[in-house]
Amino acid sequence: MTEAGPTKPSKISARSVAEIAPYALTIGAVVLAWQIAIQPLVQRAPVGLALRLAPGSAQTLSRAAEAELAADRNDNAAELARRSLATAPFNVRALRVFGLTEARAGRVDHANEVLTLAGNWSLRDDPSHAWLIEHRLRRGDYASAFAHADTLARRERVWPELFSLFTTAAATDTARALPVLARLLSNNPPWRSAYLTSLYETTDGLRVAGALAIVLERGAHPLNNTELEQLYVAFLGKGQIAAIQSIRTQLDRPPAATVTNGGFDDPASPQPFQWTLIQEAGAVADALPDDIRRDPALRVEYSGRQRATIARQQIFLAPGRYRFGSEFRIESGEPDGQLTWSITCAAGIGTFLELPIVGAGVTAESGWRAMGQEFSVPADCTSQWLDLLGQPSLDRRSAVVWFDRISVAPASSNRPSQPSA
């Protein structure tokens, strides 16, 4: 992993160094964790015994150098690393140990050169990359630091530390760190999905996730619908309705509308801006091409035996007066009063609309008909549920009904507030 460009990194303020310090501690923890975990794995025999058996072996010398470094015997580690490199100049482990001894001795510039070489020779040498991340962060070089972090992130076991690093940097130094992080994610690395999911666990993470969604939208790999749905649902779970609306407006995904997919021809829109069709006993709903218009519409089969929520969508209406509109067509049966459109506050503080189908005298030959009614949303309700409900009848009449062109629009003062057939 080569350094980016020959230009000297810009000086950073004392405040910036203070902000970067937590990252350095995080990376230090990664290095320490590696040093602890690696010892039982790399040693097939005690180092002392191995040295006695093969004192000139480059592998044995590098293992011994590693053990001396872990024991804080810096001079011994440096000498053993030099001997190993004299035997095998391309020994990454020995080169890395030597570079770390140089860093401990205060020769940081030389350590940077040595460990950069070790990192270039082996993308899997975690301690080299960990030190380089810390060193580059201390210089405020996010591009290079995050490039080395990307190398480490190919191994799942270090995700918690690295994901915390990315998020802390993007949250505390957003102007400089966020664009670099977005460029990494635009490359669609294998850890992208796991990282985005990790953001939804904290308030800072959610804030970073929202900012990333906006920046990524301009790149080669914006959030896909699954990722965008996870983002919206995470904000919704925290009750951050204003944030959802702001992100949706900036992304235009889905395009702004009070009811999304009111024509049932856009199944790709993410939740919560999408219909949920709930299949229950005696109630079946599906978006299908209509026999008359040949356009998609909602086809509902309802037995009339028990109450059912057939279709629902969460909407986000500001306080004010609105008009709900829909078109329906009866395919068979007599559904008068059995199928009702309802709008209730998602917080459970009231129902604003209950509009049943007026099917008396309407037959399959009547074709498509309009229905609508005005309603008001109070100031203390930030989101609402739009539901199509099945209401049981005493005679259990079954029916098949189509619905299309569902809409909610600001009410006009000259429109009647009564249902219209």
Image (tube, helix red, strand yellow):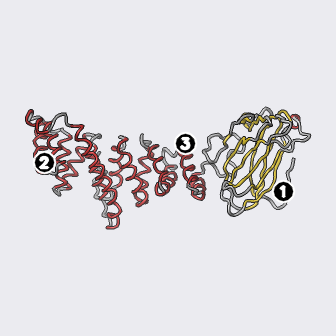
Residue annotated with mark 2 = 78
What amino acid is found at the position of numbered circle 2 in the picture? Ala
Image spot of residue 128 (x, y percent): 25, 46
Please tell me which of labels 3 and 1 falls first in the chain.
Answer: 3
Label 1 sits on a secondary structure element that is: loop
Q: Badge 3 local density, few (<14 within 10 Å), some, or many (20+)?
A: few
What amino acid is found at the position of numbered circle 1 in the picture? Ser
Label 3 sits on a secondary structure element that is: helix
Residue annotated with mark 3 = 226
Please tell me which of labels 2 and 1 falls first in the chain.
Answer: 2
Report the disc number at residue 231: none
Quarter of the figure with residue 48: top left
Instruction: Name the outermost residue toward the front.
Output: 394
What amino acid is found at the position of numbered circle 3 in the picture? Thr
Residue annotated with mark 1 = 417
Q: Badge 2 local density, few (<14 within 10 Å), some, or many (20+)?
A: many
Count numbered badges in the picture: 3
Quarter of the figure with residue 7: bottom left
Image spot of residue 365 (x, y percent): 88, 34
